[in-house]
Amino acid sequence: MSKSKMFKQNVMTYMGFESDFESSEAVVFGAPFDGTTSFRPGTRFGPAAMRQEFEGLETYSPYLDMDLEEFSLFDAGDLDLPFGAKMKSLDMIYDQTKAILSAGKVPIMVGGEHLVSYAPIKATHEKYDDLVVLHFDAHADLRSDYMEEAYSHATVMRRVWDLVGDHRIYQFGIRSGLRDEFAFANKHTILEKFSADTLEDLVKTLAKTPVYVTIDLDVLDPSIFPGTGTPEPGGLSFKDMMKVVDLLSHLNIVGADVVELAPHYDNSGASTAAACKVLRELTLAILKG
Amino acid sequence: MSKSKMFKQNVMTYMGFESDFESSEAVVFGAPFDGTTSFRPGTRFGPAAMRQEFEGLETYSPYLDMDLEEFSLFDAGDLDLPFGAKMKSLDMIYDQTKAILSAGKVPIMVGGEHLVSYAPIKATHEKYDDLVVLHFDAHADLRSDYMEEAYSHATVMRRVWDLVGDHRIYQFGIRSGLRDEFAFANKHTILEKFSADTLEDLVKTLAKTPVYVTIDLDVLDPSIFPGTGTPEPGGLSFKDMMKVVDLLSHLNIVGADVVELAPHYDNSGASTAAACKVLRELTLAILKG
Amino acid sequence: MSKSKMFKQNVMTYMGFESDFESSEAVVFGAPFDGTTSFRPGTRFGPAAMRQEFEGLETYSPYLDMDLEEFSLFDAGDLDLPFGAKMKSLDMIYDQTKAILSAGKVPIMVGGEHLVSYAPIKATHEKYDDLVVLHFDAHADLRSDYMEEAYSHATVMRRVWDLVGDHRIYQFGIRSGLRDEFAFANKHTILEKFSADTLEDLVKTLAKTPVYVTIDLDVLDPSIFPGTGTPEPGGLSFKDMMKVVDLLSHLNIVGADVVELAPHYDNSGASTAAACKVLRELTLAILKG
Amino acid sequence: MSKSKMFKQNVMTYMGFESDFESSEAVVFGAPFDGTTSFRPGTRFGPAAMRQEFEGLETYSPYLDMDLEEFSLFDAGDLDLPFGAKMKSLDMIYDQTKAILSAGKVPIMVGGEHLVSYAPIKATHEKYDDLVVLHFDAHADLRSDYMEEAYSHATVMRRVWDLVGDHRIYQFGIRSGLRDEFAFANKHTILEKFSADTLEDLVKTLAKTPVYVTIDLDVLDPSIFPGTGTPEPGGLSFKDMMKVVDLLSHLNIVGADVVELAPHYDNSGASTAAACKVLRELTLAILKG
Amino acid sequence: MSKSKMFKQNVMTYMGFESDFESSEAVVFGAPFDGTTSFRPGTRFGPAAMRQEFEGLETYSPYLDMDLEEFSLFDAGDLDLPFGAKMKSLDMIYDQTKAILSAGKVPIMVGGEHLVSYAPIKATHEKYDDLVVLHFDAHADLRSDYMEEAYSHATVMRRVWDLVGDHRIYQFGIRSGLRDEFAFANKHTILEKFSADTLEDLVKTLAKTPVYVTIDLDVLDPSIFPGTGTPEPGGLSFKDMMKVVDLLSHLNIVGADVVELAPHYDNSGASTAAACKVLRELTLAILKG
Amino acid sequence: MSKSKMFKQNVMTYMGFESDFESSEAVVFGAPFDGTTSFRPGTRFGPAAMRQEFEGLETYSPYLDMDLEEFSLFDAGDLDLPFGAKMKSLDMIYDQTKAILSAGKVPIMVGGEHLVSYAPIKATHEKYDDLVVLHFDAHADLRSDYMEEAYSHATVMRRVWDLVGDHRIYQFGIRSGLRDEFAFANKHTILEKFSADTLEDLVKTLAKTPVYVTIDLDVLDPSIFPGTGTPEPGGLSFKDMMKVVDLLSHLNIVGADVVELAPHYDNSGASTAAACKVLRELTLAILKG
C-alpha cells in the first residue's frame, strides 16, 4: 500500500467500476431490499456479496473479447433502504435511476428481490415511451396481487404491464406459475416456457428500439445457480446465458438489472461467481451495443 | 400407525399442546414475520423450526417437576402474515390475541421478530389496564423511530411505552443501544444492564398485578443462543434463564411471547433446543402461577 | 386466519394433497427410515423437508398442463418407524401400503433410504402378480448381501428380484456398482447404464401392464440433486427426468415411490425443490395414466 | 517425508496413541454406530472426526502436567459395524473389548451413539463383578424400552442396570427424561440433576473399587459442545468437566468410553476439539489413577 | 441516499472510524494474512468480515459509557499482502505501522493470523524501547521454530521475545502448548494459565509504561468465539474479557492488535460480533487511557 | 474386525491403493499445500477428504470396465509440507516424485493448489525430455508473476513453460485469465477455450510420446464441482470429463495430478465424489495406456 493510498478512506467498488460519476458511461448501484420475499429471504445481501466476489474476478471477458477496464464505469454503492416500507424503498430506487438517466448514463441495478425492478423500469419508461422489456426468470411474476398486496415479488411483471401495456414484455425461461398467470401471458405478453430460443429472432426485429433487460438470476438452472430463495430446476445453463448475453449485445439497452442472488444459500460461492459473470458480460454487452 | 390415524390429515403441533381450543387453558400460536429486520432476516422460520424440534423434547420439566401433558394446551398453528405489509400483519396478530383473551385463555406467541410483540401487548393491555410488561432482551428497543419508520424491531418497546406509560416496563439483560435509548430508559422505564438480578425483588412487589412477559431470546448469551439475527455477547446463561422462569412462576402472567429465533444461523440446532425449553418452562410457569 | 381455522389443530400436508382419505384417488405417505444407510445418513428427514418445501411450490405443472388441485389426493403423514429395527419398520410400511391398495387407491411413498421400497413393492406385487418394476437409480442395488445383511439399501433390488423374478425389473441411469452386480443384471434384469433412453420404446410395449415406479433420486445428476448420501456424478439432468415423467404418464402405474433425499446435504434447498417437483409430476403422471 | 516412511502404508491414529498393541497400557478403538438414534443421526462420524482433529492437538496437558507421549498407547482403529444390525454390532464391540481386557489392557471406546456403551460395560462387568459405573450425561437413558425396542440409546443405562443391579450406577449432569425415568432413578441408581458436585465425595468412598466411566458428551453444555444429536442447554461447562477428570484421576478406572459426538452439527470444529481434549484428559486420568 | 453521496465512490469503513487520517487519534488497518496457518486457514477473511458486521453494531458502549463517534478515528483499509511470501508481508505491515506511529497516532491492527503481530510490535518497540507486551491467547506461541520455520503463528511470541527480552511479555489465558513452551515461559516470560486474574495487580504496577496489547481472540472460550482455526475449550468468557478491557483502559497503550478471527467457522456470526465488540471496547480503552 | 487386524495400527489409504510400494505399478500421494492461494484457501484438505470419501466408492468402473482391485497400487500418504515456505514445499514434492520415478513407477499426485504441480512436472521432465503436458483448467495460469511473486497458483503453467518450452503445453477448458495470458498462449502454448474438443485429434498424433496430465478440477463446471476456491461457470460437464479420460487411456502417461479440491466449499460432498471418480478413472486410464 502506497502512503498516498493510506491517507484515503477504504473504497470498495465492483472491480472495473472505478471511474468517477461524471466521466462514466454506465452506473451500477445496489438495491438491497427483500421485504416482500415470502419464502426464503436474503437477497438483500446480494449486492455486497457480489462486490466482495468481484475482487477475485478478471475484468477481461474471453466470451466478448472485451475488458471492463477499457471503459469508464461508476459504482454508486448500495442504497440504504428501509425494510418494512416497500413503497418508500421503491421511491428511493426510482429517484436514483432518474438521476442516472438525467445525466445521460445507463443505469444497471443489482438486487435485491425482483420487486425492486419496478422502480427503474418506471423511470426508464418515462424517458423512453416505446420501451420494450426483456424479462428472464423462472417465474412469470404476473399475479394481479399476492396475499392481497398489489406490489410484491410475485406481481412485479404485472405492475410493469400496467406501465408498458400489451405485447411489450418478452418473457424467457418461465417454468413456474399459476394456471392463471400463463393464461394472462397468453393474452398480454410474449412468453417462452423453459428456454430462450426465440430471443435470436426477436433481436433482429428490435433494431434500435430502447430495451430494458431484467434478469432474475433464478432463470438459470439451480445446478449453476442454487443461491436463490426459490430454486426451480429445469432452467438455462450458463452457456445458454452466455449466448443470451451475446445476443443482447446487438440491442440498444437503456437500462438493466440483475436480481435475486441470495448468498446465504450459496455455500460454495458458485452462485455469486455466476452472478458476477452475468453482470460483467451484461455490462460489456450494453457497452458494445 | 393405527388405521384410524391413517384416515386423518397430518397434524403437527408443539409437543404437549395437543388439546382442542375449547378445553385449553393456554393457546400458543406462531407469528412468522420478520419484515422490518434490518440486519439478518429469518426469524419467520422460528415457529416452524421449534415445532419440528419439539418432537425430540420431553414434556416433563425436571426444573419445575411439572409435565405439559398434565395440562390442556392448544396449538393454533402459524398465522399467514403478508410480508411487506407490517401494519396489516400487526392487525392480524392483534385479532388473534383478542380472540384468545376473549375466550378466557392465556395467549402465548412465538415470533418472528420483536415488532410482533406490539400486537399482543396492545390486546392484553386493553383487557388489563394496569398491565406491567417484563422485557428480556439484549437491546433496549427504545428508539423513537428507525430509518424514519415508527414501527420497527428497534422501536417496539418505545411503542409499548406509548401504550402503557412511564415505569410500567421493566427491562432486563440490556447490553446494546444508542446513548439516547439508555437516557430514555433512565426517565421512563426500569432498566437493568447486562443481567436480571433485580427480578427477584420485583417479583415480591408485583403480587397479583397482571403481567405480560416478552422474551427476546437474544437476551441469552450467543454461546447458548447463537441462532439470532444480531447476536450480542455478554448475555444471560441458560441457568440464569431457568432461574428467571422459576421467579416468573410466582407471577400472574396474562400473556407472553418468545421471539427472535432465526434458525438458519443455528447450524447445530442448539438454539432451537434452547428456545423450545424456554417455551416449555415459560408455559409451565404460567400454568403454575 | 379465520376464527374457524383457529379452532382446528395445525395441519401440515403436501400442498395439493388436502382431500380426506375416502374421496382420494391417490395417497401419499412418508417412510422416514435410514437405518441401513452405510455412508451418510439423513434420508429420514426427507419426507418432512419436502412437506415444508411444498408450501412454496405451485400446484400447477407447466410441463403437463395439469394442476394437483383439480384432483382428490390425501396425505397420510409420516409413519413412526423404530430406528434400529428394520424388519419391523418394513412390516409397518407393508401394512400401510396394503391398506391403501385395499381401499382401491394408488400408494405413493416418500422415503427414506431405498430399502423402504421393498415393502410397498411386496404389497403391490401381491395384488398384481404380473407387476413390472421400473427402477431409476445411480446404483444397481443388486448385491446378494451387504456387510452380511440380506436387507439393505444396497441389496433392495435383489430382494425385489426374489419377489418378481427374471426380466421384470427395468433399471435406468445406473452408473455405480460392483462388477458382480452388472453381471447379475446381465442375466436377470434389463439394465441401461448412465441414461434412460430405452424407456421410450419400453413404454410402447407395456400397454396396460401394472407398473410400479421406484425413483431413487440420486439417479439425477448431483449438479441438480446434491442432497443425497452418495452423490454419483454423471446422472440424468432435470430435463431428462421431466421427459421420463412424461413417458410414464402413458403407463398404468399402480404404485410408486420417491426416495433418498437427504436434506442436510442440501444447503441451498435446490435438491428438496427438485424432489418436490418430481413428486408433483410423478403424481400427475399417475393421475393422467 | 523420509524415504523409509514412503515405503509404508498411510497410518492414521489418534495423536499420542502410536505404540503397538503388545506394549500398550491402554487401547483406544472406535465404535462408529448410530443405528438407533431417533432424532439426528451422525455419531457414526465421531471417531474419524476426532482422529483428524487430534492432528492439531498437543499431547501435553497443562491441566494434569502429563504428556500422552510419555506412555504406551495403541489405537486399534474403528470397528466395521453393520448398520441396521444392532445386536450383531454390539456383539462385535463386546468381542473387541473382551480381547483388550484379556490382554490386561484398559479399553477406551469412542462412539458412536450411547447404546454402544452397553457392550464394553458387559465385558468389563464380567471381569470385575463389583464394577461401579459412573455415567455423565444430559439424559437419564433409563427407559424400559423405546418405540417397543429394548436396546436403544434411550434405554442403555436401564440395560446396564440389568447387569450391575441397584445402586451401582452413579449418574451426573442429568437434565432430561420422562417423569418415570427420574422415579426409577430414585429407587435404583444414584442420580444428580444438572451438575456433578457430588463426585468429589464419591471419589473418597470408592477407593480401589473397579470403575467404568461412560461419558455421553452431551453432558457438556451445548455452548461448548453443540455437535450432538440432541443438544440440551443447562449442562456442565468445560471447566466443570476438567474438574471431573481431575477427580477421576484418583480412581481405579478399568474401562471407559466417550460417546455421542456428531460432527456434522459442529460447524466450527469446537465440539470435536472439546471431545478430543476430554479423551486426552480422561486417558491421562486413567494412566495416573 | 442524497445526490451528493451518489457522486462519491462506495466507501466502507469500520463504523465509527470515519474521520480522515490527519485528524485521527488512532488508525485501524487490516492485515489479512494467514500464510503460515498449519491447521484451518481463513483468518485472511477476518478484517473484511468485521467491517461488514460493524454495520449492525452500535458505536456506543454501555460498558465504558463512551461512544466511538465522539472521537476521531481513521480506517486505512486492508493491506494487499502477497500470500506465499511471509517476510515480504511482514515488511509491508511493519512499514504501515511505522508510518502511523511517525504521524503520532496509535496503530490498531486487525488480523489475520497471529504471526502478523510481529511486525507492529517490532515497529512499536523501535519507538518505545521500554515497551511491555500484554499477550492474550489460548496458545503460548513460544516454539523456537515450527516445521523448521522460525517465523510462524506458533513461534510469534518467541520472536517477540527476541526483540524485547526477558520478563517484558505477560501472557494470559494460556491453555495449550508443548511442555517445552511452558518451561521456556517459566524462565523468560510471565505466564498465567487458563485465566487473566493477575492482570488487575499488574495494571497497578505498569503506570505510564508504554504497553502493546496483542489479543489472539482464541483466548476467548469457543462457546462465545468458535470462529477460529484452533478452538481451545476452557477459555475466558466474554464478561471476563470485558473486565480485561476495563483494566486495560487504565494503561498507556501505544499499539494494539486483535487477531485470529476465521469467519468461515462462524456459522452464526456470533464470533464476528464478539470480535467487533472487543475491537470497539479496546479502541475506547486506548482512547480513555 | 479379526483379531489379527486388531494388532495392527490403523491404516487409511485410497480404496484400491492397498498394495505395498515395491509391487506397485503406480503410486499416489497427497500434496496438501495451499500457501499461495489468493482467494479462498482450503485445498490443503483435499487429499484427506478424498481418502475418506473413497471408502464409499466402488473400485469398479462401469465406464472403462476395469477394477482398481485388479492392479497393484500404493498410497504413500500425504507429505508433511511447511505452510509459509513454498520453495521448500516444492522441493519436498520434487524429491518424492523423483523417488517414485526412479523406482520405475508412475507418480499420481493429489493436491493442494495448482502450484504444487510444478514439482512433479519438473521431476518428470528431467526423466523424459520430450515430455508433453496436457493441462485441464478453467484458468490459463500463465501470468509471468502474481503480486510480484514468480511462483504462484496463477503462474504455474508459465513456470512449466520455462521448463518445457514452446508448443509442448496443451491447455483445455480455459475460460478465465488476463488479456495478456491469452495473448501469451497464442504464441507459446496450444489453448482451447471453454471445451476440450480438440483432444480427440491430438491423441492420434501423440502416439507413444511421454505425457504428463495435470487436471485442475475447476475445469469442471461448478454445477458438478462447486468445491473449489474460484468456481468459474461455463466448464466441462462430468460426462465431458469421462470422455476426456477415455481418450487419455490411449496415451503414454508417465505422470499425473489432480488438484484444487477445496472440500470446505463442498457442503454436499458431491465435489469430493467427483474428484474421487476422476482419480479412479485417470488411474485406470494410465494403467490401460
Image (cartoon, coloured by chain):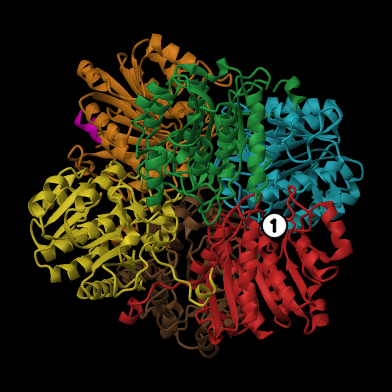
Chain colours: A green, B red, C yellow, D brown, E cyan, F orange
Q: Is residue F153 visible?
A: no
Task: Report the chain holding disc 1.
Answer: B
Q: Nearer the viewer, residue B41 or D283?
A: B41
Q: Is residue B119 above or below residue A80?
A: below
Q: Quadrant of the N terminus of chain A?
A: top right
Picture residue at 77% right of the left edge, 25% below the top: A7
Q: Percent x, y for residue A282?
A: 49, 26
Position of residue F272 in the picture relative to residue E274 (left or right): left
Q: Percent x, y for residue F24?
A: 26, 36
Residue at the far bottom: name it.
Answer: D187
Q: Percent x, y for residue B55?
A: 48, 72
Q: Is residue F288 magenta?
A: yes
The residue identified by callout 1 is: B153
Q: Residues within 10 Å of mark 1 (few under 14, many from 20)?
A: many
Residue at the far right: name it.
Answer: E207
Q: Nearer the viewer, residue D100 or C110?
A: C110
Count of numbered marks: 1
> What range of the chain is rendered magenta?
F284-289
Q: Is residue B86 magenta?
A: no
Q: Is residue C48 visible?
A: yes
Q: Percent x, y for residue E251?
A: 87, 45
Q: Is residue F241 above or below residue B192?
A: above
Q: Is residue B64 above or below residue A246?
A: below
Picture residue at 37% right of the left edge, 31% below the top: A240
Picture residue at 41% right of the left edge, 56% below the top: C263
Position of residue A200 in the picture relative to residue D254 (left or right): left
- Amino acid on which the number 1 mark rests in the picture: His
Secondary element at tag 1 = loop
Q: Nearer the viewer, residue A11 or D45?
A: A11
Position of residue A52 in the picture relative to residue F270 (left or right): right
- The kind of secondary structure the magenta stretch mainly shows is helix
